[in-house]
Image (cartoon, rainbow, N blue to C red):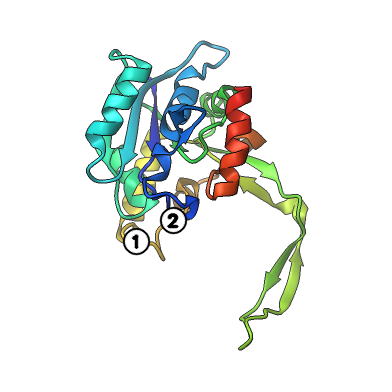
Amino acid sequence: MSVAAILTAAGSGTRLGRDEPKAFVPVDGSPLLLHAAKALLDAETADGERISQLVVTVPAGLVARASALLTQACGAELDLWVVEGGSTRQASVAAGLAAVRPEVDLILVHDAARAFAPAELIARVVTALRAGHDAVVPGLPVVDTIKRVGEPSAAGDRPVMGTVPRAELVGVQTPQGFDRELLVRAHAAGHGRAADELSAASDDAGLVEELGAVVWVVPGDRRAAKITTADDLLVARVLAAGA
């Protein structure tokens, strides 16, 4: 009975304005990939449980580079698997899932782009899983007013169709945690859409929801913000300095 983490790091750095994949962009002297991996490995529940296996998905051709970086930073004793990701996030997670050891019963799926998720947030997700929930996501209350809009006009303007009550909404983060058997079933059911960016699931909880399973929300953390644009890197540097 153990916990594995799948760390998705196969995305491009296009929106960051970089020529290299996002996970390899340095912040405070270390790639985002290492910041995210160390956060996962540092997390510990009140019962002393830690992640026992780390599976990392990276772009094609970068397996050796990522393996060397992680082994040097985290130690050769780490149960580390680095595999090539797919054409979508869903496909990448599926590739990582295939590398998880058979004795693992709980799986966390985390985005390297959320490199500064604090250890206590990660432990909170694991604790909720051990408490009996089969699917857990961290989430933050939505602070903006959200409007549902219709089709755009010729000029690109869109009509407001209604206002969505904010009390019903949360912004979902990672790591997301799952019972291993449930996550495997969810990916098997959604396999046919994994290769197409237009149809692939944007997160694993969405695949689980489609099975009819309940997904539970635990409090998120603003430090787990996703790094997507060059402006986000400025925030990331502040987070790294305070880590």
**Secondary structure found at label 2:** loop
Residue 237, image quadrant: top right
Question: Which corner quadrant holds the C terminus?
Answer: top right
- Which badge, 1 or 2, comes first in the chain's sequence? 1
Characterize the local packing of mark 2: few (<14), some (14-19) or many (20 or more) Cα atoms within 10 angstroms. Answer: some
For the residue pair 183 and 230, the one nearer the viewer reads as: 230
Q: Amino acid at mark 2?
A: Ala
Horizontal placement of 191 versus 163: left or right?
left
Front-lying residue, 129 or 56:
56
Q: Position of residue 64 (x, y in %)?
A: 22, 32
Q: Secondary structure at mark 1?
A: helix
Residue on which the image places disc 1? 193
Where does residue 229 sit, x and y in percent of width and height?
54, 50
- In this rendering, is residue 242 above or below 88? above
Residue type at numbered disc 1: Arg
Q: Position of residue 124 (x, y in %)?
A: 59, 26
Whether residue 102 appears in this view of the structure is no
Using the rendered image of the protein, determine whether residue 187 is visible from the camera's viewpoint: yes
Q: Position of residue 97 (x, y in %)?
A: 31, 38
Farthest bottom residue? Answer: 154
237 to 198, vertically: above or below: above
**For the point 41% across and 39% down, which residue is it?**
23
Q: Identify the residue at image location x=43%, y=39%.
A: 25
Image quarter of residue 52: top left
Q: Quadrant of the N terminus?
A: top left
Out of 135 and 142, give the one closest to the viewer. 142
Q: Which mark is residue 220?
A: none
- Between the residue at mark 1 and the residue at mark 2, the CA separation in whole angstroms equals 8 Å
Q: Are marks 1 and 2 in contact (CB under 8 Å)?
A: yes
Looking at the rendered structure, the number of numbered marks drawn on it comes to 2
Residue denoted by label 2: 201
